[in-house]
Image (cartoon, grey):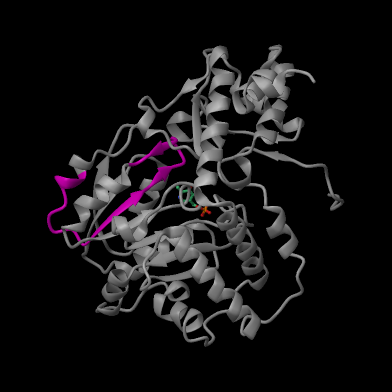
């Protein structure tokens, strides 16, 4: 296996995403110790920037966990659930079911609210089951099906109930509107390699003051020592040793997060919408159609497209991979039925999708896809030769 640099790979997967150039550059910085004053200063900037990304209040504790998004998910249940607690988990896809599995392992009595694949969780279904619940858990954007769940509406119901609200913000925070304080979200997490386009290995989390109060009132020790909020606060707030944080990944995440805030979150939201619309306009005449029926329930950062009848899913994706283009298919019940095109972070740009259209022209014998895509992205003016 050669480690020589290779030509750019076109990564259209719904995570990981290509590393932002500023994050790539930051990875070259020399190593410092995890207790170095410069690293603590960098961490403080990361904490403030995360508060901004999540739309979090002043009393919110933000930090990076040394693991992927799933560790962010697990830390929420490990710290905020005690054995016997009633936890209402909204599960309309694989990640919702992963939440239910984890909550159960930490001793929760899990109540499930489900919806058919490709459909959003209905707020009325949540309202009907809220009585006596200590926590509600929801995936904002379900990557496995491309569904955006109605978080603001569900949050409003939960707010009056006394339950904590845990939200998986992996496909939304940093790209789509996320208003932790205004909506009343108590715990949110994401993964560095999704909307922020940083290397995998860090989970940015945010813990509201209400969730911290619940944590302080625990009767039992947190069963997951590594991600105990108390230990994390020792390091992130009191600057004492808990475990060795991956300093180089902190550099890269800091740079990627700054790049996102410099660009502006509304601009990033616009990018995802614009490229997503252009992909759909280009591929619809070939028989691709949105997997999620209702337009308001489509997750802008993961475009789930139903494949045309008779389409050779595995064969075409393999031929694309030979051309250095990675496209992700369905998962579980949607395997062979859909493609899931990523529009998070650096993937939500015209250039990588133009490369897909050029390759599909060749593989499907369909001329003019790239031109149609250009026109959809930039308007007719840009496609007229000078
Ligand atoms: C990717 C993803 C996760 C899990 O993240 P890992 O980084 O793979 O651990 C959780 N939730 C959603 C919605 C995701 O898309």
Determine whether 57 is above or below 174 in the image.
Answer: below
Residue visible at 37% across and 24% down in the picture: 293
Whether the magenta-drawn stretch holds residue 258 is answered as no
x and y percentages locating residue 61 in the rendered image? 41, 72
From which residue to which does the magenta span run? 126-149
* 98 displayed left or right of 23: left
Who's the residue at 72% across and 64% down the image?
Answer: 27
Q: With respect to residue 140, does 35 lie above or below? A: below
Asked whether residue 107 is in view, the answer is yes
Q: Position of residue 308 (x, y in %)?
A: 53, 15
Q: Residue 223 versus residue 230: which sits nearer the camera? A: 230
User: To which quarter of the image does residue 318 belong?
Assistant: top right
The residue depicted at 40 percent of the width and 80 percent of the height is 230
Question: Residue 136: where, in percent of width, then height?
Answer: 26, 55
The percent position of residue 252, horizontal first and vertical second, equals: 66, 63
Picture quarter with the C terminus: top right
In front of the other: 117 or 286: 286
Q: Which of 78/351 is in front?
A: 351
On screen, residue 173 above or below 108: above
Q: Residue at x 67, y 52 (%)?
A: 19
Left or right of 61, for residue 255: right
Is residue 143 located in the magenta-colored stretch of the structure?
Answer: yes
Q: How many marks?
A: 0
210 displayed left or right of 304: left
Q: Let me know if residue 104 appears in the view.
A: no
User: Is residue 72 positioned above or below 223 on the image?
Assistant: above
């Amino acid at each position: 296996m050669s480690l020589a640099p290779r030509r750019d790979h076109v990564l259209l997967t719904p995570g990981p995403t290509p590393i932002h150039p500023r994050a790539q550059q930051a990875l070259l910085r020399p190593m410092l110790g995890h207790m170095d004053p410069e690293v603590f200063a960098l961490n403080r900037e990361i904490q403030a920037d995360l508060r901004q990304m999540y739309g979090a209040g002043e009393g919110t504790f933000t930090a990076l966990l040394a693991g992927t998004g799933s560790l962010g998910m697990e830390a929420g249940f490990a710290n905020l659930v005690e054995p016997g607690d009633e936890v209402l988990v909204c599960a309309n896809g694989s990640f919702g079911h992963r939440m239910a599995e984890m909550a159960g392992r930490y001793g929760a009595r899990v109540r499930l609210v489900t919806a058919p694949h490709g459909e959003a969780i209905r707020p009325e279904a949540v309202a009907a089951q809220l009585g006596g619940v200590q926590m509600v858990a929801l995936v904002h954007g379900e990557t496995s099906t491309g569904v955006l769940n109605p978080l603001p509406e569900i949050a409003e119901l939960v707010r009056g109930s006394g339950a904590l609200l845990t939200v998986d913000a992996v496909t939304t925070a940093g790209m789509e509107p996320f208003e932790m304080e205004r909506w009343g979200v108590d715990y949110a997490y994401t993964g560095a390699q999704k909307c922020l386009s940083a290397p995998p290995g860090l989970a940015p989390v945010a813990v509201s003051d209400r969730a911290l109060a619940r944590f302080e009132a625990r009767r039992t020790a947190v069963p997951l020592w590594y991600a105990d909020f108390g230990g994390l606060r020792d390091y992130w707030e009191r600057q004492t040793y808990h475990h060795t944080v991956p300093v180089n990944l902190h550099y890269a995440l800091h740079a990627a997060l700054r790049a996102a805030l410099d660009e502006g979150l509304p601009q990033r939201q616009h990018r995802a919408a614009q490229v997503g619309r252009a992909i759909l306009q280009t591929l619809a005449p070939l028989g691709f159609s949105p997997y999620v029926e209702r337009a308001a329930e489509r997750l802008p950062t993961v475009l789930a497209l139903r494949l045309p009848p008779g389409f050779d899913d595995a064969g075409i994706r393999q031929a694309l991979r030979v051309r250095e283009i990675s496209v992700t298919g369905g998962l579980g019940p949607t395997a062979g039925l859909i493609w899931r095109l990523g529009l998070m972070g650096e993937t939500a740009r015209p250039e990588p999708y133009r490369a897909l259209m050029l390759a599909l022209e060749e593989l499907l014998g369909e001329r003019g896809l790239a031109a149609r895509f250009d026109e959809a992205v930039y308007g007719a003016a840009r496609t007229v030769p000078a």
